[in-house]
Image: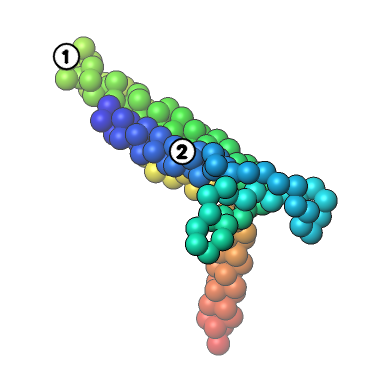
Amino acid sequence: MCPLILHVFCYGRILYTLHCRSQPPVSAVFTLDRLTSPDVHTIRSASTSSHGLHACLSVGNFKHVAKATKNVTQTLSIVTLCYVICFLPHQVRVLLFHIGGLGECGLCWLIPVTLVFAHCCINPFIYTARYVEFQEGLRSLALHLRLTCDTANDNSHL
């Protein structure tokens, strides 16, 4: 149970930090300064320093950060759900074993342990399904491995 609590605490802190950073400052004054396109507005901080305005951020940046935060939240939720699904049966089995309610039967041991081992390789699939960067990295790796194998096969015929 401690790993789950630690898992939820760490991911909760990550999400809290991302949420705080995705919100515009409370002291921000929205002005309708047109930049490069008619739909982009500027947020200027009301607090000024000796060097002028403290911050100048576009509304589009906050929307982008909010969208990224939502995507990260969904991904972390999926990762946490997979963690719970894979580890909970094992934790229940260990608990039942220690209180004497469960002996060491074959499937009672095999299924939870298999789920725990499956969890070790599930995160890359989640990230690949959710992020284009991972998909591109996988393609690049596959191409590199293919070229390496082709080169090794060509050299073995010499």
Q: In the figure, is residue 76 to the left or right of 134?
A: left
The mark found on residue 15 in the picture is 2
Give coordinates of residue 157: x percent, y percent.
56, 82
Q: Look at 62% across and 59% down and name the residue there.
A: 136
Q: Position of residue 154 (x, y in %)?
A: 59, 80
**Residue type at the position of mark 1:** Gly
Classed neighbour count for the residue bearing mark 2: other residues with Cα under 10 Å, few (<14), some (14–19), many (≥20): some
Taking the spot 44% from the left edge, 33% from the top edge, the residue there is: 80
Rendering coords of residue 13 (x, y %): 39, 38
Element marked by disc 1: loop
The earlier-in-sequence mark between 2 and 1 is 2
Q: Which residue is mark 1?
A: 100
Q: Is residue 24 above or below residue 83?
A: below
> Which three-letter amino acid code belongs to the residue tagged 2?
Leu
Q: Residue at image x 27%, y 27%?
A: 1
Whether residues under marks 2 and 1 lie with C-beta atoms below 8 angstroms apart, the answer is: no
Q: Quadrant of the C terminus?
A: bottom right
| Label 1 crowd bin: few (<14), some (14–19), many (20+), radius 10 Å | few
